[in-house]
Amino acid sequence: MSEQAPIKLSEMPGLPVTGVLYNPRSHRNRDRQVVEPDYPVIRVEQPQRRRDLKAAMQRFVDSGVELLVINGGDGTVRDALTGGAMVFGDKWPDIAVLPRGKTNALTIDLEMPKSWSLEEAIIAHRDGTRVQRQPMMLRPMDGQELTRLGFVLGAGMFMAAIDSGQDAHRFGAFDGLAVAVTTVWGVAQLLFGTNANPWRRGAEARIMLGEDMKELPRSKLGDPAARALIFMSTMTKFPAGIRPFGDAGGPIRLAVIDTMRRRVVAQAPWLLSGKHLGDMDKLGLHQVGTDRIELDLGDRFILDGEVFAPGRYCVTPGPMLNFVVP
């Protein structure tokens, strides 16, 4: 008996009008061509420049897209959400993410399979489930730059970690292996490096929280104008099961380390596991949740892989989005 032919999407009822934002520069998309399934209601966009994003998203709106598939890594997700915010308003389609980048933090949070295909994502819109996630909105307070949407923002030691992660990528380490390589290298720099080392130097920063603009307290340790690490996110799950925010609630969760003392480095495994350490404030460790953060930064920082210049920024919760999962 001959094998049964695979079911064609065009023959399956109840599937959505689908738009695909495809990034050919993403790590796992290089040297590959877009393969459109046998499906009559699909539109693929490959914007070459960031300024083309709004027009691409508007074409999705005009096509009546019910499912937006983002094919790329964290940076592609950031750009897609930023472009989508210009046209979707409060009527976003459901979203599916195909993890194709060097880093795919959101898909780890969503517990997505690495090998998920476009066909599987389209079918999951009908047969799968939805989970809600809320990106952060980063707004420059000088009004000169575009408001961005993203899930992970970091400064200080976070910048050094990203740079080391890029080095790990160049040597062929990705995903969990890249995290491990970066962690080992970072601990070595923190234990044996000088205060001029990027892993220890930190970032000049003021951090104000909530509508009443209350400044985040600071310990008496280290440079009073700087923070060693600033890390914030709306995600709930991170690689290797780390819990950088402990039990902090709120739509935006924030972890800050005032200065990298060796005692803090030694207790990092317990801190990253979510355990509350005694005298955290005296150690210069802060884990808080809030719905508004204003940053006055004297150094560069990163949002989902994009580097931003020093300045004043406001971070608030973005739209609540529905993500399709298997």
Image (tube, rainbow, N blue to C red):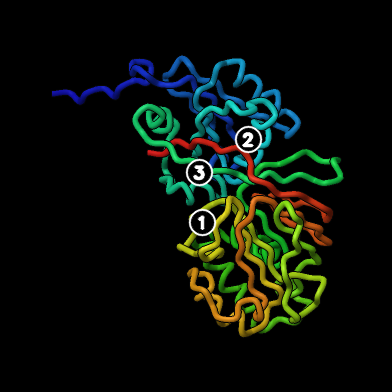
Q: Report the amino acid beneath label 2.
A: Ala
Q: What kind of element bears circle 3? A: strand
Q: Quadrant of the C terminus?
A: top left
Residue at the (50%, 76%) spot, across then down: 270
| Residue at the disc numbered 3 | 99
Mark 1 Cα-neighbour bin, 10 Å: few <14, some 14–19, many ≥20: some
Q: Image quadrant of residue 220?
A: bottom right
Q: Residue at x 41, y 39 (%)?
A: 325
Q: Secondary structure at mark 1?
A: helix
> First in sequence: mark 2 or mark 3?
2
Q: Residue type at mark 1: give it.
A: Asp
Q: Residue furthest left?
A: 1
Residue 83 % position (x, y) = 68, 32
Q: Quadrant of residue 179?
A: bottom right
Percent coordinates x, y for residue 188 in the rendering: 62, 79
- Relative to 257, residue 49 above or below: above
Q: Which residue carries the number 1 mark?
A: 175
Secondary structure at badge 2 equals helix
Q: Nearer the viewer, mark 2 or mark 1?
A: 2
Q: Nearer the viewer, residue 147 or 118?
A: 147
Where is residue 299 drawn, in percent x and y?
Answer: 81, 61
- Relative height, residue 209 to residue 46 (above, below): below
Name the kind of residue labelled 3 in the image. Answer: Pro
Q: Which residue lies at the image location 60% right of the left edge and 37% below the top edge?
A: 319
Q: Which residue is mark 2?
A: 80
Q: N-terminal of the two: label 3 or label 1? A: 3
Q: Nearer the viewer, residue 281 or 228?
A: 281
Asked if the residues shown at circle 2 and circle 1 are in contact, with their CB atoms under 8 angstroms apart, the answer is no
The residue lying at 50 percent from left, 58 percent from top is 238
308 left or right of 80?
Answer: right
